Amino acid sequence: MIKNYLKIAWRNLLKHPTTTGIHLLGLTVGLTTCLLILLFIQNEWSYDRHHKLGERIYRVNEIATVGGEVERSGTTPYPLSLALRNDFSDWSKITRIHADRDVRIMVSREKILLEDKVLFAEPELFELFALDMVSGNSRTILSQPNQVILTESTAKTYFGTTPAVGKTLKLDNKVTVQVAGIMRDIPSQSILNARMIISFPTMKDYFEFSLDQWGVRSGGSVFALLPEGRSPEQYTARLAAASKKYFAEERGSTHQLVLQPLHDIHFNPDFDGSKFAPPISPTYLYVFGIVGLFVLLIACVNFINMSTARAMTRAREVGVRKVVGATQGQLVSQFLSEAFWLAGLSAVLALVLTYGLLPSVNDFMQKQIGFRWTESVLFMTVLAVLTTVLAGSYPAFFLARFVPVKVLKAHAEPGRRGQAWLRQGLVVFQFTISLVLAVGVLVVYRQMSYFRQKDLGFSREAIVTVSLPETRNLRPLGQEFRQIPGVEHVSFALGAPTSDNNFGTDMHPDPTNEDKKIGISLKVVDADYLETYGLTLLAGRFLEHRDTLGISGKIPEEQRRYVFVVNETVVKALGLSKPEQALGRKIRAGINNITAEIVGVVKDFHSSSLRKPIEPVVMMNFPYFYRTAGLKLQTANYQKTIAAVERTFRTFYPEGLFDAKFLDQSLQEQYEEEERQFTLLRVFAGLALVICCLGLWGLATFIIERRTKEIGVRKVLGASVPSLVALLSRDFLKLILVAIVLATPLAWFAMNQWLNDFTYRIEIEWWMFVVVGLLATGVAVLTVSFQSIKAALMNPVKSLRTD
């Protein structure tokens, strides 16, 4: 019986190739979208789920309230781990780490690589996390200075088939480490997805500042293993006491230590995630899941709409079957078999498409999403069955209820009223979802354009940044750079204005008052920084070359004279109304406790992405940290100029790695995640609109076929082609207008929530909804008009020839 149902269903599908093709295309796209999104969500939710002790591992975070603003961070002072070991002896294990990126690794004179996932850690790391050693003892290795553990893939990259243990590597031309062990690759779904782990004592020679300073925060974090059966809430009071003990409290400023579960780190953007794996909002995953389901629902709506529209062509078939003894259950099974054929074929095609598309998706998303055949086949089977029930049930029961006497009469149109409201409602539903997605595309595009065009307070055009392997010979290097035709200005600094290469620390407005401080971003720059990056000086002067002489290493520490240049936000934080009032004022920075005079004030500029407000910035001379050269170029002949820059670089650093980037490209990288969201949203919106139009085209085809004789009569009576096209399109346009009305508030609410994540954002304006509405209306008119014009141009003699 089932075999017979499937055979007849297959014949019926082949009998109507256009309808079958529309169904098959829509369902395949919907199922493929759902499977890809499922694999993506599954990949994200699996972060750090492989650690046996994962439920007991917590990161110690800091919540600082300064000047009424709350700052949450997973980066904490380096001495914190030692303090916690003394005060929390009941914690099973405590380990501190330091994550670093873009580290130059010299394997040999001929082989220098840029490593973006380097981790400094203590031996307890291997006791907390599921990390497997292949050779060597992690406790012994990580407790000694200048030792490193490589992952298997890293060892192969560096040394090929040659045994790596015993080999040496040089980090940033500063520290030489010996390979003392090999470990298995860390899963990509981990916040600690490092390619090498270096012993923490090595930090003493690698890091420029003393690790004993509570005012230094630069990529360091602390992880703790809580006793079994204990919850983080049980340590709230003790953590509060530790906060007061180790962080000086001042008026209007507080510090609080809190515990964050390991499994929460990747899904909580409020705190820093990991340098190796930026945090992702769970809302982002929910939205993607909902969008995938909506795309599938739109495809199912097409199936229902077109199946009910074809009801008249199947009505007499149903009547004859019932007359010869077919039961309603048998008819339902027959029609569900057709839906199952379509869903099953679509599921198979979706599996093949997903498998083929996944490598491209991984490249685009910068992920390592794996394709698991067993889970994917099981998921698609379940989804195919649900699609069969969802898309096939109503048409099956609707057709099976036909009364033989009525459907076998001439001109009978069973269920006409019921079909009308259902089809109209489903069309409105389809286009409402598509319009919401289309508005989302426009809003995200405008926000991305705003990022690209907003005045950041500095110049970003025609500036190239070059990473420096060391800080020796900078003066002759700068002179050689300036001699290159096409180079206008040269500056040495720790990083560009929006670079992450700065220090987060505290500023004491009154050096004599330890209790009052303000959180700042400390930038190390030279005297040419202002002119090279186009900063605006508001008061006083900028740094000068003579300031560098005043802090020479030949001068005793107590006689060195530092000076600071600050931004407007620092002036406001000091309680001053004009930039000139800050000149001559002495403040103290939390790094190395440097006390210096403010000699200049610059206009505010964005020192981080536009997601965050402008923060207090203090700039100072410190040649030891000049790790980046900024070159302002003339706009002509970039390639020739950069080639000359590279030749000069290699003359000074023959063993260095030349790493040059245009500043505007670096700025664009800050918004890569939003760009990916924008691209995916465009794809989803496009798919939804295409599926909608396919359904609308098929629906219009059937409706126009049913009105063929009416069109013929109207043409005989003198109706023009434009009037007939307007008549046939009018009902569909009404539905689109209803969809626009429903989509407008939904789209406004959804995109307003998305924009709330940005400190600097656009406003959602009325014209955006008008543009999207007109676009949707135009697409719908074109879709329906094709069939309408075809029907209106038909010879009325042919349409009226037969009854």
Image: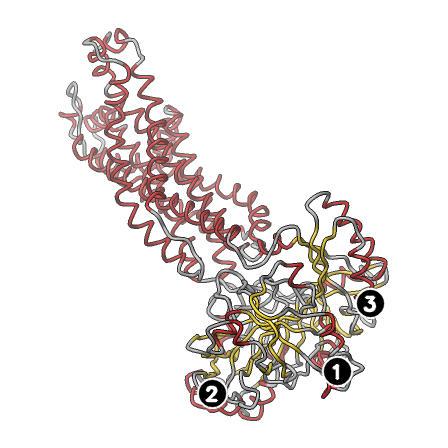
Kindly report the distance in space between the C-alpha atoms of the residues bearing marks 2 and 3. Answer: 43 Å
Q: Residue at x 50, y 44 (%)?
A: 351
Q: Residue at x 34, y 43 (%)?
A: 767
Q: Which of the labelled discs sits on residue 673, or is there none? A: none
Residues at marks 1 and 3 touching, judged by CB atoms closer than 8 Å: no
Element class at badge 3 = loop
Please give the name of the residue rendered at 41% of the width and 48% of the height, measured from the top-left corner.
443
Nearest the viewer among 275 and 365 is 275
Reading the image, the residue beneath label 1 is 144
User: Which amino acid, by three-letter code, is at mark 3?
Assistant: Asn
Which one is nearer the viewer's eye here, 44 or 477?
A: 477
Q: Amino acid at mark 1?
A: Gln
Q: How is the image coloured?
A: secondary structure
What kind of element bears circle 2? loop
Q: Nearer the viewer, mark 1 or mark 2?
A: 2
| Residue 44 in view, yes or no | yes
Whole-percent x and y of residue 523?
A: 63, 70
Q: Are marks 1 and 2 in contact (CB under 8 Å)?
A: no
The crowd level at tag 3 (other Cα within 10 Å; few <14, some 14-19, many 20+) is few
Q: Determine if residue 57 is in view.
A: no
Q: Position of residue 499 (x, y in %)?
A: 61, 63
Of the image marks 1 and 2, the number of the one nearer the N terminus = 1
The disc, 2 or 3, on the residue closer to the chain's N-terminal end is: 2
The residue that mark 2 highlights is 250
Looking at the rendered image, the quarter that the N terminus falls into is top left
Mark 2: give few (<14), some (14-19) or many (20+) Cα within 10 Å.
some
Residue tagged by mark 3? Answer: 473
Name which of mark 1 and mark 3 comes first in the sequence: 1
Give the Cα distance between marks 1 and 3: 33 Å
436, above or below 471, in the image: above
